[in-house]
Amino acid sequence: MTLYIDPPDWPGHGLLWSHLVSDVSYEELHAFAASIGCPRRAFERDHYDVPAHRYAAAVAAGAVQVPSREVVRILTAAGLRRRKTRPAF
């Protein structure tokens, strides 16, 4: 069971954000996110968007810090990557 988090470098809604992912399952990811106070609405397809003020709690709870480029590699290797779908026109 390993959870990974990238640095809070992603701007949005006046905050900086990290991405929290699992290399095992979404169930593991949901349980971990809940344990650090992330609401389910922060889940987007295959990761949680974690605000910078929760970053230290995620790391203290055991999330492994990785560079942003590693997040997609980890998800893909675990078979958990869910790409955005493009709308049909």
Image (spheres, helix red, strand yellow):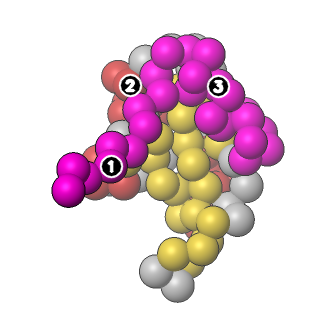
Q: Position of residue 6 (x, y in %)?
A: 70, 47
Q: Nearer the viewer, residue 3 or 61?
A: 3
Q: For the residues carrying marks 3 and 1, which lies nearer the camera in this image? A: 1
The label shown at residue 16 is: none
SS category of the residue bearing label 2 = helix
Judge whether residue 62 can be spotted in this image. Answer: no
Classify 10 Å Cα crowding around label 1: few (below 14), some (14-19), many (20 and above): few
In the current view of this chain or complex, which residue is farthest to the front?
Answer: 89
Q: Position of residue 22 (x, y in %)?
A: 53, 26
Q: Nearer the viewer, residue 89 or 24?
A: 89
SS category of the residue bearing label 1 = loop
The label shown at residue 74 is: 3
Q: Position of residue 50 (x, y in %)?
A: 52, 56
Q: Which residues are magenta?
A: 62-89
Q: Nearer the viewer, residue 39 or 86?
A: 86
**Amino acid type assigned to the residue bearing label 3 in the image:** Ile
Q: Going from the N terminus, do you reach mark 2 or mark 3 first?
A: 2
Q: Which quadrant would residue 51 be assigned to in this image?
A: bottom right
- Residue of label 1: 86
**Drawn side of residue 42 relative to residue 87, left or right:** right
Q: How far is mark 3 from mark 1, CA to CA?
A: 23 Å
Q: Which quadrant would residue 66 be assigned to in this image?
A: top right
Residue at figure coordinates x 65%, y 42% from the top left: 5
Placement of the C terminus among the 4 image quadrants: bottom left
SS category of the residue bearing label 3 = helix
**Amino acid type assigned to the residue bearing label 1 in the image:** Arg
Q: Which quadrant would residue 83 be assigned to in this image?
A: top left
- Residue of label 2: 26
In the current view of this chain or complex, which residue is farthest to the bottom?
Answer: 14
Residue at figure coordinates x 48%, y 54% from the top left: 49
Q: Going from the N terminus, do you reach mark 3 or mark 1 first?
A: 3
Classify 10 Å Cα crowding around label 3: few (below 14), some (14-19), many (20 and above): some
